Image (cartoon, rainbow, N blue to C red):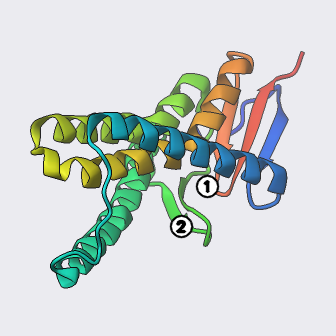
Amino acid sequence: MTPFELPQGYEEIRNINLQKNIKLTILINGGALVIGAAMFCIGTFFVPFTFDIFADNPLLHLAQLFVMLIAIVLYMLGHELIHGIFIKKYSGKKAKYGFTGLYAFAGSDAYFNKSQYIVIALAPVVFFGIVFLLLNIFLPANLFWPIYFMQIMNLSGAAGDFYITALACRLPSDILTRDSGVSMKIYSRTK
């Protein structure tokens, strides 16, 4: 049996498609906003937030904003690449990557068991969470907010990963998940 064949005796128990399930999409994006707002408030306890784009050198601030936009794009690509690394680790084949207009994704035709799928889902947020935390600890305070903003993006942007992890934790231990990147089908043994 390969990771690309559904074992006999399994049936679909859940089908999640964020492009078609508007309520779930709103719930996950709402959760992302709540996480982001909460983290922003927590960050102000460490370093007061100031946004002074029209200060003494507006071109410098515009350049900083441009650098932040590039950093966000690179982070998003890195996030999906880490999903892909673990997809390949568990399936033996490269992930399929894409962008829906709403979010970037890494997907596969393989079936992943519960623990594999949770690792695939959480690996990027854990990796970047540690990286951004260490950068915030060891770099000068004047770099706190640009780095912490990336941490906010990391945790709030993983709202979908948190959702699917919480769902997987509540499902039977024998589940297999097939995540194409735009939809997830979850299977379990028939009783």
**Residue at the (74%, 46%) spot, across then down:** 27
Q: Secondary structure at mark 2?
A: strand
Q: Secondary structure at mark 1?
A: loop
Give percent across and percent down for residue 55: 22, 75
Q: Is residue 55 above or below residue 104?
A: below
Q: Name the side, left or right, on which 125 lies relative to 3.
A: left
Camera-side residue: 101 or 41? 41
Task: State which quadrant residue 31 falls in.
Answer: top right
Q: Name the side, left or right, on which 113 lies relative to 88.
A: right
Give percent across and percent down for residue 123: 41, 36
C-alpha gap between disc 1 and disc 2:
8 Å
Camera-side residue: 149 or 23? 149
Camera-side residue: 122 or 107? 122
Give percent across and percent down for residue 75: 35, 57
Give percent across and percent down for residue 92: 43, 44
**Residue at the (35%, 55%) spot, across then down:** 78
Camera-side residue: 85 or 66? 66
Residue behind mark 1: 181
Q: Is residue 166 above or below residue 108?
A: above
Neighbor class of circle 2 (other Cα within 10 Å; few <14, some 14-19, many 20+) is: some
Residue behind mark 2: 98
